[in-house]
Image: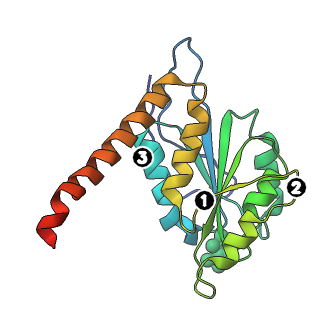
Amino acid sequence: MFAFYDKMMPVPAGATALCGCFPEREGGNRMKKVGIVMGSDSDLPVVRKTADQLKTLGIPYEAHVFSAHRTPVQARDFALNARKNGFGVIIAAAGMAAHLAGAIAANTTLPVIGIPCKSAALDGMDALLATVMMPKGIPVATVAIDGGANAALLAAQILAVEDAALCAKLDAKRASDAKAVLEKDAAILEKL
Ligand code: RP5
């Protein structure tokens, strides 16, 4: 059974934006959701790549704007309740002094994936270092600066550990990506 929700934004304060689809898995247990949190709606262009990739793979997600600095209570509550609310992975996107992924990870033992977002002043190096340099004991799996799609794929790979159908979709994507590169290889001499 699938329930589709088209709009990821806007998300009213304190409200839940439920997006994606909810495939019934073999045995009747539902796929875990991916939580997407962003420090500001200005991170939306990066997060949209995450949401699009999750949609393509048929993975349900919920998206929120929570800031480690501006709304720390909401960010903490989301993380504390994420497991019981049906999440399997949390993706946190933030720029500048990007403490969001770390603040989420501090309050859950679900896997947390950080996306450092590019900012005007330091081109994303600020967010990259703030996200990746976590202290021992509180890991955050950090993808590339603005790496929204890879964050989704890593979340999918985590969920696919226990999900053969999702694993097959990821295998098919790898095969299709490889085919595209082989076609470029075959065509490259004509361009030179
Ligand atoms: C961070 O500060 C956000 O994640 C965003 O990348 C950056 C700028 O936020 P805004 O000033 O655009 O709201 O917390």
**Residue 88 falls in image quadrant:** top right
Percent across and percent down for residue 33 are 60, 37
Q: Nearer the viewer, mark 2 or mark 3?
A: 2
Res. 8 in view:
no
Please state which amino acid type lies under the numbered disc 3: Asp
Choose between 4 and 130: the one closer to the eye.
130
Which residue corresponds to the image point at 56% horizontal and 14% vertical from the top-left? 28
Q: Quadrant of ligand 1?
A: bottom right
The circle drawn on residue 6 is 3
Question: Is tag 3's residue or tag 1's residue first in the polypeptide sequence?
Answer: 3
**Quarter the C terminus occupies:** bottom left
Q: Dot 1: few (<14), some (14–19), or many (≥20) neighbours within 10 Å?
A: many
Which residue corresponds to the image point at 44% horizontal and 48% vertical from the top-left? 53
For disc 1, the marked residue is 143
Helix, strand or loop at label 1? It is loop
Choose between 65 and 185: the one closer to the eye.
185
Choose between 88 and 141: the one closer to the eye.
141
Question: Is tag 2's residue or tag 3's residue first in the polypeptide sequence?
Answer: 3
The circle drawn on residue 176 is none
**Residue 39 falls in image quadrant:** bottom right
Helix, strand or loop at label 2? It is loop
Is residue 115 left or right of 129 when viewed as pictured? left
The circle drawn on residue 136 is 2
Marks 3 and 1, how far apart in space? Answer: 26 Å
Q: Is residue 129 shown above or below 79?
A: below
